[in-house]
Amino acid sequence: MDPGVRSISGHLNLPLLQELIQLTQYSDTQLAKDIQQGLPVIGKMPEIKGVFAPLKSNPDPKESNKKKTKKKKKLTASQLLDEASSSMRKTLNEIRLGEFDEEIWTATLAEVESGLMEGPYSHEEAFQRFGRHVISKRFPVRQPDKTRLCDDYRRSQVNAATEYTQRITLPTHHTLEVAWRKMSKARPGEPMTIYKSDHAAAYRQVPTDPNEAPFQLICVKGPDGEPAIFRHLALSFGASSSVVNYCRLSQCLIHLHRVMFGAVSMSFIDDYWGIEPATSAATAYECWTVLNELLGFKEKESKKAPPSSDVRLLGLDVQLSANTLTLSLTDEKRKQLCNSLSE
């Protein structure tokens, strides 16, 4: 196993994951092997039948023509490197002229310390180590409870070199409603509950292919005023391929939980939940925890929620009673909506 890949996934029980995939006849038979080698960043994403849906075909010729005009031509790896080389001096100068952000610098060094990144490198050092490469700028997305570091793979055109043959389909509140109706019909009069979980730094638990390191470089301004380049070892926020690659894992874990333990569980990217009768909910919740522990995937303890009849899910408050399921806006969203209407 490559040292960079081992830094991210060396603790995972990939032989067990492979065995469970075979045992439950899961479609994504290459997942464990791909995690062992690191997942792709650019190029054509693998087609996995039975996991992701085919791309939508639009029957309306007018709409189809509109999409064709908006669709940008995909770049090859060679074309991407050519584009990056021609604009490298300009990009580096823009970073030199930008403001030094202490928060970004400190957080990036912390990722190096935790084994998620390598660096910092000067431009010359990066060229010696990776050859021709692409650098993406890093920027903060400040949220109420945290600051998320994102990398601009759109402007660097890394995302333009990524191609998909399938689309991800995710559950919604309607999916939850359908599951609740079926469960209530099968177990009439029995109270229903929902439990939740979340992977800790979800994308950062999945390694990337070391052969694609030249496309996983980000650049920030260092305290000396010079550009500092870092290499991602795991999936990163900003790369469109990260969503598909992580969903390969999340869909597999949900499949294992359903098939092996008979649980009614779902996932929306890295948000996991299940709906169960009160009599079996605690067991289903425990099985989910044990499954992750055995395979080596880390849950975010602060986001774990044991079975309850009153939870917040996908931005809405969900309340379950003996015969009803109620979805309502959170107080914060209600205030935002009222303010928008009054403006």
Image (cartoon, grey):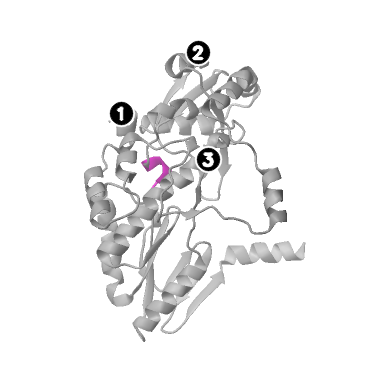
- Closer to us: mark 2 or mark 3? 3
Which mark is on residue 2? 1
Name the residue that disc number 3 marks. 163
Residue 167 location, x and y as percent? Answer: 51, 52
Identify which residue, 123 or 316, lies in the foreground: 123
Q: Identify whether 221 is placed above or below 236.
A: above
Q: What kind of residue is marked 1?
A: Asp
Disc 1 or disc 2, which is closer to the eye? 1
Badge 2: how crowded within 10 Å, few (<14), some, or many (20+)? Answer: few
Quadrant into which the C terminus falls: bottom right
Estimate the spatial distance between the alpha carbons at disc 3 and disc 1, rounded to whole Å: 25 Å
Secondary structure of residue under mark 3: strand
What amino acid type is highlighted by mark number 3? Glu
Marks 1/2: CA–CA distance: 24 Å
Viewer-nearest residue: 47 or 120: 47
Which residues fall within the magenta stretch?
200-205
Mark 2 to mark 3 CA distance (whole Å): 30 Å
Residue 10 in picture, x, y percent from top left: 27, 36
Callout 1: 10 Å neighbours few (<14), some, many (20+)? Answer: few
Badge 2 is on which residue? Answer: 124
At x 34%, y 82%, the residue is: 187
Crowd class of label 3 (few under 14; some 14 to 19; many from 20; radius 10 Å): some
Q: Residue at x 51, y 76 (%)?
A: 326
Q: Secondary structure at mark 1?
A: loop
Of circles 3 and 1, the one toward us is 3
User: Is most of the magenta stretch helix, strand or loop?
Assistant: helix
Q: Quadrant of residue 113?
A: top left
